[in-house]
Structures are given as C-alpha cells and as structure tokens.
Amino acid sequence: MEFQAEACVKEYKERFLEYYDELKWLYCEIYENKMYMFNSLCSSMYQFYTGRKNSLKNIDRKRIKNPYWYKENKMEGMMMYTDAFAGNLEETRKKLDYIAECDVNYIHLMPLLDSPDEKSDGGYAVSNYRKVKPGLGSMKDLENLAEDCHKRNISLCLDFVMNHTSEEHEWAKRAKCGEAEYQKRYYFYDNYDIPSEFEKTVPDVFPVTAPGNFTWIPDLQKFVMTTFYPYQWDLNYQNPVVFNEMVYNILNLVNKGIDVVRIDAVPYIWKQPGTNCRNLPQVHNIVRMLRIICEIVCPGVLLLGEVVMAPDKVVPYFGTLEKPECHMLYNVTTMASTWNSVATRDIRLLRKQMDIVNSLPKEYTFLNYLRCHDDIGWGLDYKWLIQFGIEENSHKEYLNSFLTGQYPGSFARGELYNSDPASGDARLCGTTASFCGIEKALADGDNKGLEKAIQLDLMLHAYMLVQSGIPVIYSGDEIGQENDYSYHQIPGKKEDSRYLHRGNFNWKLAEKRTKNGSVQQKLFDGIKKLGNIRKRHIVFDARADVWTVDTYDNALLCLIRKYENEKLVALFNFSEYDKTAWINEDDGIYKDLLLNKEMMAKDIYMPAYGIRWLLKK
Ligand code: GLC
C-alpha cells in the first residue's frame, strides 16, 4: 500500500513531500519494480521520526534554522577509541570535562557496536548494529553520553560500517546455515568463475594482510565476497532488503542522539564485474538517498563520508549544490601532502593541493586532520611531481624510509603498513608526536632536538587549524603521545601496524599538561592557544576567501585568508632551518597573533618550523 503522507505531522509531511519524487525516482532507478519495498521504507521512516525524542527534534529544528552550524570556526573536533580513551562509554561521559578543557565541541567515537573480540578490525566488523559492544557499555550509556554532550554543545560522531558485516552477524550466520534469503544479502558464488572475473579488475585493499577479494566458506562450498578482511562480508546493496535494513540501522542509531554519521568505506558499496568496484554511479545514488532520508527524518544529522581516494574521486561525494550527498568529507590528500612536506621540506605539492581545495565551492566542508586511526597512504600527484624529477616508486620509498626513521638523519619514528614486496608499495603508521621527532629526542635525551620536534608538532597543528572546515585532533596528540609498540605482542593486533598509533590514552602523561615546561604543557597549551585564536576571529570562517602566495622558498608556505573586515597572512616553515619569507603584502601594519607584536607583512623572518599568524584589521 502506498505510504500516505497526508496523515503525518505537519513538519514531517512538508519535508517528505519536498523530497518524495526524487527519493522515489532514485529508489526505482536501482530497485526497479520494488515499489512494495519503497513503501515499506517510507512507512518505517515515519516510525523512526515519531520515535525520535523531542529533545532531538528540537535540535533538528534549531539546525534547520542555522544550517551553517557545523561550518562555523568555533568547531573543533577530537577522535578516539572509547576503550583506549576511558575504558567504556560511562567513563567517557565522566571525562567530558577534559574534552571541554581541550575546547573541543565535536567528538568522533570510533566503532563501538558489537563485534567479535578478535576478528573485529578495530570494531569495523559489526555483528549487531542494535547493540553496543558489551565491554563498552549499553545503548542506554550511549544515549546518556549523547545527552550530556548536547548539554555541553558537543556533537557526537559515530561510525556506520555499511560496506560489510562481521561473519558473526545474524545475517551471516543464517547465510552460513544455508538460508537463501540471507545468502542473497551478500555476494555468494558456487565456484570461482565470477570471482575470478572480479579479481581481474578489483585491486586489493589490504594486499599483504588480506590479499584477494573473496573467501572460501567450506561449510557452504561457496565463495563470499570480502573486499576487506575475510571475516568482513560485503553486503549486497543490489538487494533492496539490505538497503532498507541498513537505513533502519542508521535511523535507530541517530535516534540515540548521534549528530554525525561517518559512513565507513562508502565508495565500495556497489559491485560490478569488469569494474574496480569503487565509486560506481549507484554509490552516489545510494548516498543521495541517505542524505534525503536524513533530511526528512532527522535533518539535524550530518553525513561524513569516508572516501580515502584521489581528489577527483572525493569531491563528487559532496554531490552538487542542488543535490548534496555528504555534508563533510576527509581532506585526505592534504593530510598526505602535509607529511610529504615534512619529509621533503618542500611545500610545492602542498601548495598546489591547497590551491585546488581553495578553489572548490565554499559550501563543501572538509574535515582536516594530521592523522587518524588508519594508515597514511601516498596517493600524491605523481604526474605533477615528475616535472621536478620526482618519480613515484623511489619517492614513496624515500617518504617511508624518512618517516620510519631509516633514512640517515631522520628524526621520525613510524612503521610500515601493508608493505607489499611484490609491488614495492607500502603505507605508513605512527602518531604525530613520533613522526615529528618527540619520541626520538626523548629517547636520545636530546633537548635541542626535542624543542624542534615540539615546534614542528605545533606548526603542523597550526597549519591544520588555518584551513577551512573542521579540524580534528587525534586523542593523545594534544599531549604528544608516542607510538605504542605493545600491539606487537597482542594476538589479533600484531599483524596490523595501525595499532601502533591507536594506543591507550595516557592519563598520567596528561596530568603533566599543567607542569610548566613539560612537553605536554607546551603542546597542550600551544594547540589550545591556536584553537582559541581560530575561534575568536571571523577570518577563520569557512566563507573566507583563501589563497596561497609565493614565498620564494620551497620550505615556506604562505596562506592568506580574507573575510569581512579581517585579513590573515599565515606562514609555515617546513624546514629545520631559519628562513625568510620574501612576501610583500604591503598594505599596512599587521599583528602577529601568537607573539602579540605588530609588524609589516613583508620579508618575514621565519625560525625553524616557525608559525606566523599575522592579522590585519
Ligand atoms: C575504513 C576504516 C578502516 C577499516 C575499513 C574497513 O576504511 O577507517 O579502519 O579497516 O574501513 O571497515
């Protein structure tokens, strides 16, 4: 029976009717003749709306009035694993004072839904979307945490792992028992004919730790598609039951008070033989439907797309201005280019990347970060770099050698990730502090080296904070937490070097943030000061015009921001040598916001790893 919008509450009806045609069109495009499924989606959406708490509906209404809320320069985020940060959800709730002390008003809690202990990929193999992993607490704890966050004006982001379920998920278990209905929710094949077709065109995500895209299930004598780890079974979104049910899982979560849904590994959700099974047009169709569904049911909720791809693949996930898809995307190429600049002391590629980002519509919001829970991949623009004689393979080798501390004179400490001897390719893991040299300097008792390392760490944070969008700090980076090598001894973790930078938050170390002159105090206060300046000045608003200017030195990056009556000249020295930025913004007196000193924006002395934020009124 067709869903009757007439009977709905007024605000819902209006929103539903605004999007109805487009939603129906998109649905029918991929699920032809499945109108009964569409109608059941529509009625369930309304049930989720009616089940949404009034407090959340009020937040929705407030955000509809100010759709700009998440783009404001007062936004600052932090990401963390619940267990690594505080043990569980309830303890995390008790630590909100610390979060507030960091001036953070957006937290991303890494996957916390139920997943097996060992085969969990850090929680990215979900066995039950309606249950919190028991060690972390309950759905009630999650709701309480969200409520307390809202009282403090903190938004809560949670992962939604949508490409696959754990092999322990009820659907997977029933599929394993031979139930055809559940097998149809995954990609099952009786023999290797079709899988071998896929393998010709689909690259490996984990070429070393999980090569191949299919797994043989002996009990069933069938292959199942597993793009990531063998225990993560790819969901078949060509089956509308999968789409509908996953939408219900999302809506159930947001009704617990989640503000931002991080749609994990979204480019992978549609598969077709003969393609690389990434970014297919149907993926955009599905993301647009998710956006519409949220706009109707919970319009205050944002979608953060996890698209770790080249820029030309990332940007389409914003959709168009008329038909937006994700509200936010990771600024992944900028992040990787930043570490390229650290290792090479050369900002030319980073500057080019900034110019690309700054030329995009200002409505597109990026999530800026120095590192996250995942590895750093070297998806750099090698076609452009080759003009300087920089060739892909040898350059990646250099970056990895430098950032793992192998290269002579390197201050960095990190480990390779999925180093593939066949292709010579490898990615990289490590914490910001360890990459910046804090770990090495402390181990060597090298005070001078330590000062430089702290300065580099602060400079990188200043650079992250100067960009438009939401800056997100990885929990622990604010106190300079080093690599955690203990994962080498832990079964289920030791094969995955990403655990190197996912260590437990060290509360003992955090206490030192109040001890004058400690590494922790310098970083904590330094980052806080930068963040506060960012929040105070309208020039950091995402509506600002942003451009780069030449400094006539490849190690010095200069960014200019202009908005309303403010202009900011921001300079960053990516080298360990003192330098001069040969700029000439010759229009009066500027104030150095960090030194509180007046100066001209002309021929500026830049100490090693120095930062200048010069404001002209
Ligand atoms: C995303 C996550 C990553 C995980 C993968 C598979 O890329 O960030 O940690 O391994 O999805 O779910």
Image (cartoon, grey):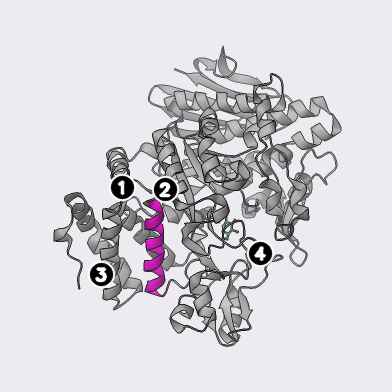
Asked if ligand 1 lies within 8 A of label 1, the reply is: no
- Nearer-N-terminus badge (2/3): 3
Q: Position of residue 207 (x, y in %)?
A: 68, 66
- Residue at the spot 80% in from the left edge and 25% down from the top edge: 448
In the image, 485: left or right of 77? right
Mark 4 and mark 2: span between their CA atoms? 30 Å
Does 486 sit above or below residue 458? below
Give the structural element (helix, strand or loop) at label 3: helix
Mark 4 and mark 1: span between their CA atoms? 41 Å
Give the structural element (helix, strand or loop) at label 1: loop
Image mark for residue 206? 4
Give the structural element (helix, strand or loop) at label 2: loop
Residue linked to disc 3: 39
Cβ–Cβ under 8 Å for marks 1 and 3: no
Q: Position of residue 482 (x, y in %)?
A: 72, 39
Residue 569 among magenta residues? no
Image mark for residue 258? 2
Q: Nearer the viewer, residue 56 or 344?
A: 56
Q: Which residues are magenta?
A: 238-254
Amino acid at dot 4:
Phe
Mark 4 and mark 3: span between their CA atoms? 39 Å
- Nearer-N-terminus badge (1/3): 3
Which class describes the residues within 10 Å of circle 1: few (<14), some (14-19), or many (20+)? few
Give the main secondary structure, helix, strand or loop, of the magenta stretch: helix
Residue linked to disc 1: 53
